[in-house]
Amino acid sequence: MKRYFQSSVSAVALSVMVMGGVTTTVSITAAPAFAKSDNANSNSNGGNRNDNSNRGGRGNGNGRGAVASSLGALNAAHANENALANAAANSRVGMIAIYKAAVVASAEAALGIEDAQAAYDAYVAAQEAAGFQSAYETYDDYLTADPAPSEEEILHWETLDSLQSTIDTATADAVAAKTLENDALELAANKETGDEVISALWELLELPAE
């Protein structure tokens, strides 16, 4: 049986959001669970990676000092869980807490895509195992069929359509969650962020490694 629909997990969205009175415009790509943001690493000179950290040097004092310096205001992530939970939303600690929550939400949304895709794949596999062969190549062929499709065909194609809609909704949710994650990081940081800075931030926030 052919794959009639394809999930657009890598769909790119452009969104304008308002957080804490600040408006930001970002372009993002839906990513796997707990994948670190790519957009947070772009700068105003055309998106080139600006890694202020001392790569390869985190094993010594100078390396850690460089990372701490690059973290800037994000060093407020040293705050304990109680402080993060009770900080004012417009405070630095509060904005970091919002970022942490956004990372978790983004990961959950990405898992939602995986679950929706797994449900789709399981249905297709079950139909194949049952020996079902559709008379139509695509959903549009089914919709324009003449004479009208059989009840079995209707059940098959409407189920596929419903499962695909679930994938599409999950993908849109993941895109929105990733946008919020990127925006939250931009608002919390006072410096450009690179891979090592974000890794250090995740360590401080006790977020699971990628």
Image (tube, rainbow, N blue to C red):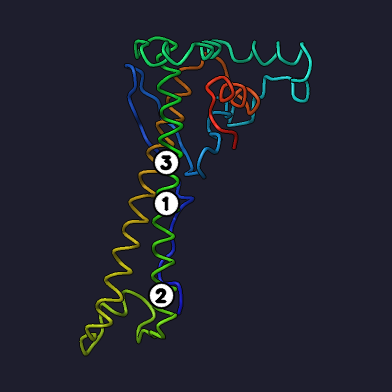
Q: Quadrant of residue 161?
A: bottom left
First-in-chain label (3 vs 1) = 3
Task: Identify residue for label 1.
Answer: 113
First-in-chain label (1 vs 2) = 1
What amino acid is found at the position of numbered circle 1 in the picture? Ile
Gap in Å between the C-alphas at discs 3 and 1?
Answer: 9 Å
Across and down, in percent, residue 148 comes to 20, 86
Instruction: In the displayed orientation, state which residue is furthest to the bottom.
Output: 147
Task: Identify residue for label 2.
Answer: 126
User: Is the C terminus in the top left, top right, bottom left or bottom right quadrant?
Assistant: top right
Gap in Å between the C-alphas at discs 3 and 2?
Answer: 27 Å
Q: How many marks?
A: 3
Across and down, in percent, residue 205 comes to 52, 22
Residue 87 in the figure: left or right of residue 48 = left
First-in-chain label (3 vs 2) = 3
Vertically, is 122 above or below 28? below
Vertically, is 4 above or below 149? above
Q: Residues within 10 Å of mark 3 (few under 14, many from 20)?
A: some
Rendered residue at 42%/59% (across/down): 117
